[in-house]
Image: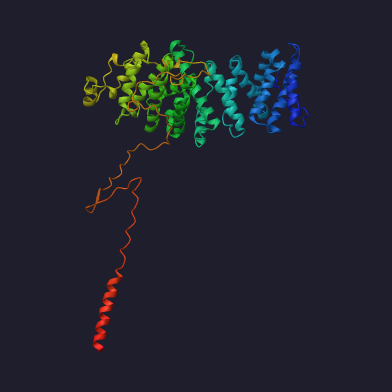
Amino acid sequence: MAGLGGEYVSIENEEQLWNEIATIAATQCAANAHEVIDDCLRTWLSLASRCRTDFDLSEEEVAICSHHLLRGTLFLANAEYVRTQIIYSLLQDDEPAHLYPIANLLLLDGRANETTFRKMIEENSFHRLVELINGRKEDDPPLHRLLLELIYEMSRIQKLRIQDLALVDDGFVSYLFQLTEILSDDVNDPCHSSIIRVLLVLNEQYMVASATAVAMPDPSVAPLTNRVVKCLSLYGTQYKTFGENLILLLNRETETAMQLLILKLLYLLFTTTATCEYFYTNDLHVLLDVIIRNLLDLPNELTSLRHTYLRVMYPLLAHTPLSQPPYYKKAEIQKVMRLLAGAGNTHFEAADETTLRLVDRVTKVNWLQEDQNSAGELARRILGISLSPTDTASSISVADVAEVSEKPGVQTPSRKAEGEVELSISPVEVRTIETKVMAPTPNRSKKTPPEVPKHRYGTPVQSVTANPPKKIPPKAPPPRRVGRFKVVSSASDENGASSNK
């Protein structure tokens, strides 16, 4: 059928509006009474759209309107049919006032029941959402943000079809990156994080499609281009804000699935020649601090997440500006790798085979090696070549990173939160600090201010202390010796008297 549209109901006040919504949601009808259900849905859509247009209700109140329908008899008795009709309305309705409650209902229903998102993919909703998002932020910002959240939640539940990903062009990806720059002044803007999440989930879908194509090649299907990495490869200097906020998001994120999405993109950026220097060096320092902290804080059972951090850490240290002197936190990295390998700390269980292999790979980064006079290092410094023996690196492929996944919403447990004993690591050896991403600065050496002279013209200059000594007031002058003047005065009087005689 065509879109539900919306049947107008005369409403005089907000109380009447909520009463009508509750009445529609509680409607009881036969399972096959599709016309009655359609009429009820049209009325609900009209009322829900007027929450914003006529009564200027908040986004939370519109969500309450959706909850009324989802918990009502009308939906519970005919859930499959109602979902189908709402999805068709998304595909066919162009009225922003109607699209907002439609998207809100699908988002809430999909979070509670993944079947909704899977059905949306089957009904070609992905392309429709791309069409509604692309270039339309200024038309209705709240609707735009809601559509971003909907496409993100739908895309991270299930693998997208090749024909869906093929519909994403460079223009759409560039538009999302441009929005991150426009919103760079407000990192806490909900739309900002929604855009970053959509770019991350698109990258994951490209990685999964690439891994599938390698495992099961199909000559009839043209290989897909990862347009997220392509855009950063060509225009990365224009989209620095995205990289800064990516690190900031990893620093704050506690959801395992989101950490994996971020790490997957970082892995590709650090293993791609055109993007391995995308981040500023200061930002890479922050990222390394975050990775060290998270590796030490992960419980023993989270092996997949630990492996992914280690897989990202190797190209981070080997291919980015961190591989150039002055080397950042060399001793701390070596200490952490020894701990992860199970050496010298009882708080870590025996490392599994994959962890040992990945730790060994990290420790064999040239500038981390203890022996700087090894054959490979001498060849690199003297002859300008790099030796790559098979035992110095493991065969890490995109598939190893792409296949790691976690159910959305699962929070990453913490050693500290679980009350485990603190690791026996000196604060000097490993500083697990909370950091905030600094504003991008040019890569230039910091000038050292001139030393303050200790003497000025040979006279020592007293240093100024934080609490200077209290000044002692000068002594009071001695009293005048008045008696002396009296004696002198008396003598002169006597002389004057004798001369008169």
Residue 450 lies, in percent from the top left, at: 28, 45
Horizontal side, residue 204 vs residue 80: left or right = left
Image-quadrant location for residue 383: top left
Image-quadrant location for residue 12: top right
Near-viewer residue (93 or 465): 465
Horizontal side, residue 359 vs residue 51: left or right = left
Assign the N terminus to one quadrant of the image. Answer: top right
Residue 4 lies, in percent from the top left, at: 71, 22
Near-viewer residue (351 or 499): 499
Horizontal side, residue 175 vs residue 476: left or right = right
Residue 419 lies, in percent from the top left, at: 44, 19
Assign the C terminus to one quadrant of the image. Answer: bottom left
Near-viewer residue (222 or 140): 140
Tell me, yes or no, if residue 169 can be seen here.
no
Image-quadrant location for residue 448: top left
Q: Residue at x 67, y 18 (%)?
A: 70
Q: Residue at x 30, y 63 (%)?
A: 478
Residue 441 vs 364, above or below: the answer is below
Residue 284 lies, in percent from the top left, at: 38, 29
Q: Which color scheme did the rendering employ for the protein? A: rainbow
Near-viewer residue (118 or 75): 75
Q: Residue at x 29, y 16 (%)?
A: 392
Tell me, yes or no, if residue 214 can be seen here.
yes
In this rendering, the count of numbered labels is 0
